[in-house]
Image (cartoon, rainbow, N blue to C red):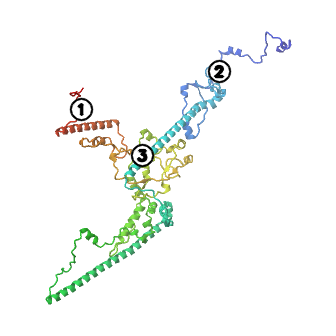
Amino acid sequence: MLKTLMEQDDGGRGMDHVGLECGVASPAHAVSTLGSASFREPLPRNAAETHLSTDKRLDRKRRGLVPWSPEPQVPDVGGVGWRTKAGHLIKNQSFYPQVTTNLWDNPTFAGVNSWKEFHGPRKRADADMMEQLDRFDAQRAELEAQRTFVNTTRVETLDRFYNRKLNRVQLSTSPSWAPHRKSKREVHSSYETFDGCMDEKPQKELRKVFTEKVLAGDREAIRQIAKRVQNEETWKEVFKRMEQERQADLRADLQHRQAHVDRLMALSGQPVKQHLPPGQQHRSVANASARTEEIAQHKKPPAITDLCAHSDFRGLLHADSGHALEALFPGAGHQLSTEFRARATESAQAGWPPPKPAETPRMATSAEARAARQSASLSKLSIPSSVPRMERLGARTGDELQKQHAQPQFLPTAAPPPPDQSATLLHEDWSATTTMQDCARVTGSFSRTSHLGSPVSQSSKLEMIPPPRRSYVYPMMAPTSPHTAPQASNGLGSTATLLLGSHSAPSLGLGRSAGRSCTNVSLGRARRSSAACGEASAAAAASVCRELDEFELHAESAAVPRISNFFGTPRPRAGAS
């Protein structure tokens, strides 16, 4: 019929009616069946409150993935779209979403199988929220890493600054200080030998040269030389006594001859000269002073104070290489050398029977040296840092940590040898990127001396962070200056102003009353509460007022004229115009 209508005017004439060919039943006929059979939901629905999703990140962290399972239920909100009794989707808000997305990604238009296998498990796992939580945790971890970097760097800077400030105070009051030790080759070219540069070698190289057999042979050589020196000193003492005995014999013989001459003169009737009794030495009459008599005495031979200072001991380890022994045995090498030299000096004293040879002193173990180093008290300054900042540190390389790796100074004008390089403290990288790679290091007291491992981290994480750096310097513990006046310092290196008594106010002792109440005794900065400082200030002011009252009372009793205005009231003078 449509073809007949179109062929009448070749499609050029408008028709009032259009005919359509109908091959399928019209949907309008379905309206008649609405009341007989309604649409049934293929999946049961429940309230959205009971369809809450749990955080699956714990399962992902424990298993490595989120387990998948088909979703048998549909929530009333956010699930498959609601349908009419005829099975048509209701044109509600979920049918027209405000977010531009593909229709297959919208669960409203999903079918049963799509909901069970894709949209349902995805909504149950809540992958979008997991991604947002992961992003939020990453941002928070980065913020904490940046805060840790700032706090750690700030505290390290303050520790270094106040340590140098304390060092300057000690250097300004110390009578002597230990400069950096230089090698003997820099002093003279004669030390350009194998044994002349042992003091500058590290511990690992000294172990290859100074073995137990070499050290035992060196001590035996010192004993043999000391034995020969003791024999020589004994014979010197013997010869000296022989000279004294010969002198006494000569004097006795002369006295015997004098007595014989006196006897002959007495028999011949001649006057006999009076002589000193036997055993008494003759003293000539002189008017010299006691100091002249003291200077006129013969010089006594010097006693042996340090046997190893003799030229025969040059080149021996215990005599010349005490610094190298300290590097070989940290904390005990210098004591070993000094004590053995003292024993060798005692064994070389003149006498018979000869003294026992010098015994090898007991050397302190590394544990004892470490315990002695830890038991030493440390003088330090407190830094101006708040408690929250101190609680968020990666590590603090302050004076207490440096004390555990410091070398004690055993000579007043020489620095101790450097420690073994493998025992020096490592400087960690606390940047935000490195801290996020290995968060286990943020303990507040993290430290290590070896690159091979970490006390808190796994070896796999160490591959993701840059290696720590070795320092070019090493810490040293030196005794504090005895001339330091801690009561006159406020911890910042500046001297506190103290008002002492004077002639005009002899009882005004502000420095003794107020200065002691608010000043810290040690070099550390005192942190006192505002209430305590207020009470101390009030007490100081009361004591000052009391002293002023006492001063006025004593001034009145001593008839001291009061201080008054000597300019009288202005009056006109006679004859003045």
Classify residue 336 by image quadrant.
bottom left
Crowdedness near tag 2: few (<14), some (14–19) or many (≥20) residues, C-alpha within 10 Å: some
- State the residue position of label 2: 89
**Residue displayed at 41% across by 47% down:** 165
> What is the C-alpha distance between the residues marked 3 and 1?
55 Å
- Front one among 274 and 544: 274
Left or right: residue 353 versus residue 145 is: left
The residue beneath circle 1 is 567
Q: Nearer the viewer, residue 357 or 52?
A: 357
Please, which residue is most extreme toward the left here? 269
Distance between the Cα atoms at labels 2 and 1?
A: 110 Å
The image quadrant that residue 122 belongs to is: top right
Q: Nearer the viewer, mark 3 or mark 1?
A: 1
Residue drawn at (63%, 27%), measured in percent from left and top?
A: 107
Which circle, 2 or 3, is nearer the viewer?
3
Tell me which label, 2 or 1, sits earlier in the chain. Answer: 2
**Label drawn at residue 162:** 3
> Is 457 above or below relative to 130?
below
The numbered mark, 3 or 1, whose residue comes first in the sequence reads 3
Q: Amino acid at mark 3?
A: Tyr
**Left or right of residue 192: residue 17:** right
Classify mark 1: residues with Cα within 10 Å, few (<14), some (14-19) or many (20+): few
- Mark 2 touching mark 1, by CB under 8 A? no
Q: Secondary structure at mark 1?
A: loop
Number of labelled discs? 3
Give the secondary structure at mark 2.
loop
- Helix, strand or loop at mark 3: helix
Along the viewing direction, whichever of 343 and 247 lies nearer the viewer: 247
| Within-10-Å neighbours for mark 3: few <14, some 14–19, many 20+ | many
Report how far apart the C-alphas of labels 2 and 3 lie in the structure.
76 Å
Asked if residue 342 is positioned above or below residue 87 in the image, the reply reads: below
Q: Amino acid at mark 2?
A: Leu
